Structure formats: C-alpha cells, structure tokens
C-alpha cells in the first residue's frame, strides 16, 4: 500500500496564507488574463454562452498558449455570437463543413464538429453543462469525493452522445477523446479541473462563478508543470508524478490554507511559473524578490523548485518519474 502524506501542518498553512495573499495582490491580472484561455469565456455575458466557450477553450488548451489560442478564437468565431445556440442547433442539424480548415495538432475539423454536437446534445437533454454536472455531483453523494466520478460521467455523456459519434464515422473517436479525456484515467485531468475552476469559483476578477450546484470547496487544483513545480517548492507535495493523486494532495494542503476555496490561489501560482518569476532553475535574484520566498523550501536548500524540496510534516510519496507536459493554460 502506498504511504499517505501526513496533513499539511497548520503552522505552515498559517504562515503561507499571507504570502499567497500578497502574491495574489501583486499579480497584474489584466496582463495575465490576456495570456490565459480564461479570457474566452469571460468575453461572453450570457452564462450559457460562457459555459460553452469555456469548454471549447479548455478542450483545445494543450500545447503552447500562443499556438492554441488562435485556434480557439477561430472555432468560437465559426460559432457566431452565441456558442450555446450554435451548438444546440448543430446537434440537431450538423454542418460537417462548419470548421473546415481548422486544424490543431491532434485534432481535425470532424473532431471539432463532434465536440460542438456533443455540447449541444448535452445542453438540449439536460438544460446545461453545469446543470448536468450538478445533478451527477449530488447523485455521487456531494462533497470532494463526488467530484471525480461526477466529472467522469459528464465527460462520458459528451463523448458518447450519438450526435457526436455520427460525425466521426470513418475517423474514429480518438480526436474527440483527446479533447474530452476521461477524468477517471491516470492523469491529473488538468483541463477539466481548470474548466471547473472557471465555472464554479468566484465570481471574481478571474473566475466566473456560474455554476452554483458544486461548491468551491470540492474543487481540485488544475495540475500543470508550473503549479506542480511551485507546489513542490512550497512543500505542498513531494510527489513527482502528474497524477490526480498528486493534484488531490496539493489541494488538501491548500485546503488547510483556505478550507472553503482551496483553488483560490491556483491562478496566481500558475502564472508565477508561467511568467518566469519562479524559474525551473534557481535564480538568486528572482528567488530573493519572490513573494513566497519565506515559505520556499527550494530557496532554503539552495536548489531548484523541482528538486530536493520535501514537504515538512509530509510522508515521502510518489517515486515515479514525472510526465513531461507542456503548459496548457
């Protein structure tokens, strides 16, 4: 049996809270939002359009932001002023040529058509993506333990929608599965958890807070390379694998900082890494100026944020090699 990490010490959580708040206040939100896919759902006033735009954006948010963001913009432009109405109509009467010429890495126009049809089908059947997730969350018992199975069922609803599968005849489901991965699988489901952060927490200067059916306290940190590195440096985890278990361990530590809103500081932590202010290799000048410096185990040991940082009060866990992933925020 793998050893479970001990609870993040209360004293460390108390010491970390004001540092995270200071980091959060120091962030240039306007500049960072412009570098983040959250700008796409934030562009829509109607909650129905925002939830659809958010899922489109997060599904394509793999690889480099400067490469996937123009693709997201093209897909949303093809959907017109109301992505929700477009997808609902598309599910009933699809136009296979709607996304002609839109290609991004593993995905081709039929995958994007299937995604639009899947979103429209679930919205038509259940009244909205958030409404469907909320019902599944309650069916699974509510609370943090219900999030993953509920999310897995929502993903299955989308992937298995007959309206979507009909558009993939001759191509197969692989591309759609890449856009809508299974949260029950071995990975951290970073894109799904990022989408939930946008939709559930807030509203504030970053997140939209549109879905009230799931509490912010149940959310899991969207684990990418930036958050993972900073979390290890802060002693929130010692795990090296980019797995759901690692994301849960980091979330559990952050829940000691803010029980009601454990992913409150995710945007700031991610962009601390994305901006280069927390480099992969130790930079004395940047480390000394960092708002989190007083809590950084890596700085105290004189090593980089991804090596040698071991959480205080936490059992050593996770010996598998980290999966190398490009940031997809």
Image (cartoon, helix red, strand yellow):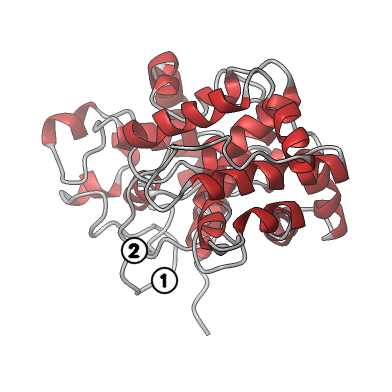
The residue wearing badge 1 is 317
Q: Position of residue 64 (x, y in %)?
A: 33, 40
Residue 191, given in percent of the width and then of the height, sits at 52, 47
Q: Can residue 214 be seen from the camera position used here? A: no
Residue 285 location in percent, x, y? Answer: 13, 30
Query: Is 12 displayed left or right of 10 in the figure?
Result: left
Q: Residue at x 58, y 47 (%)?
A: 193
* Rendered residue at 69%/15% (across/down): 45
Q: Is residue 170 left or right of residue 285?
A: right
- Horizontal arrangement in the rendering, residue 57 relative to residue 134 (left or right): left
Instruction: Say what secondary structure mark 1 lies in.
Output: loop
Q: Are marks 1 and 2 in contact (CB under 8 Å)?
A: no
Residue at which label 2 appears: 323
Which label's residue is closer to the chain start, 1 or 2?
A: 1
Identify the secondary structure beneath mark 2.
loop
Question: Looking at this rendering, what residue extends furthest in the left direction?
Answer: 284
Q: Quadrant of residue 261?
A: top right
Inter-mark Cα distance, 1 to 2:
16 Å
Res 258 → quadrant: top right
Point out residue 292 in the picture as x, y percentages from the top left corner: 34, 34
> Which of 23 and 209 lies nearest the eye of the viewer?
209
Residue 78 position by quadrant: top right
Can residue 148 be seen here? The reply is: yes
Q: Quadrant of the C terminus?
A: top left
């Amino acid at each position: 049996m793998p050893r479970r990490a001990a609870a993040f010490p209360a004293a460390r959580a108390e010491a970390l809270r004001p540092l995270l708040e200071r980091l959060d206040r120091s962030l240039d939100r306007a500049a960072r939002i412009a570098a983040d896919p959250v700008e796409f759902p934030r562009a829509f006033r109607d909650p129905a359009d925002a939830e659809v735009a958010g899922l489109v954006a997060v599904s394509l948010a793999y690889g480099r932001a400067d490469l996937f963001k123009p693709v997201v913009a093209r897909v949303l432009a093809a959907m017109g002023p109301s992505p929700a109405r477009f997808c609902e109509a598309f599910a009933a009467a699809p136009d296979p040529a709607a996304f002609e010429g839109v290609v991004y890495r593993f995905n081709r126009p039929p995958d994007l058509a299937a995604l639009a049809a899947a979103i429209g089908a679930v919205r038509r059947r259940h009244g909205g993506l958030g409404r469907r997730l909320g019902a599944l969350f309650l069916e699974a018992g509510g609370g943090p333990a219900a999030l993953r199975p509920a999310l897995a069922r929502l993903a299955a609803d989308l992937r298995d929608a007959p309206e979507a599968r009909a558009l993939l005849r001759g191509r197969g489901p692989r591309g759609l599965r890449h856009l809508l991965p299974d949260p029950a699988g071995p990975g951290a489901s970073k894109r799904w958890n990022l989408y939930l952060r946008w939709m559930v927490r807030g509203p504030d200067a970053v997140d939209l807070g549109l879905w009230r059916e799931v509490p912010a306290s149940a959310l899991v940190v969207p684990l990418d390379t930036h958050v993972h590195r900073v979390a290890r440096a802060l002693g929130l985890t010692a795990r090296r694998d980019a797995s759901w278990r690692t994301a849960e361990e980091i979330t559990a530590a952050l829940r000691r900082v803010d029980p009601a809103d454990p992913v409150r500081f995710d945007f700031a932590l991610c962009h601390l890494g994305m901006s280069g202010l927390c480099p992969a290799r130790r930079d004395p000048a940047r480390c000394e100026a960092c708002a989190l410096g007083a809590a950084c185990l890596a700085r105290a040991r004189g090593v980089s944020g991804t090596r040698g940082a071991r959480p205080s009060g936490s059992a050593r866990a996770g010996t598998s090699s980290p999966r190398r992933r490009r940031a997809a925020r």
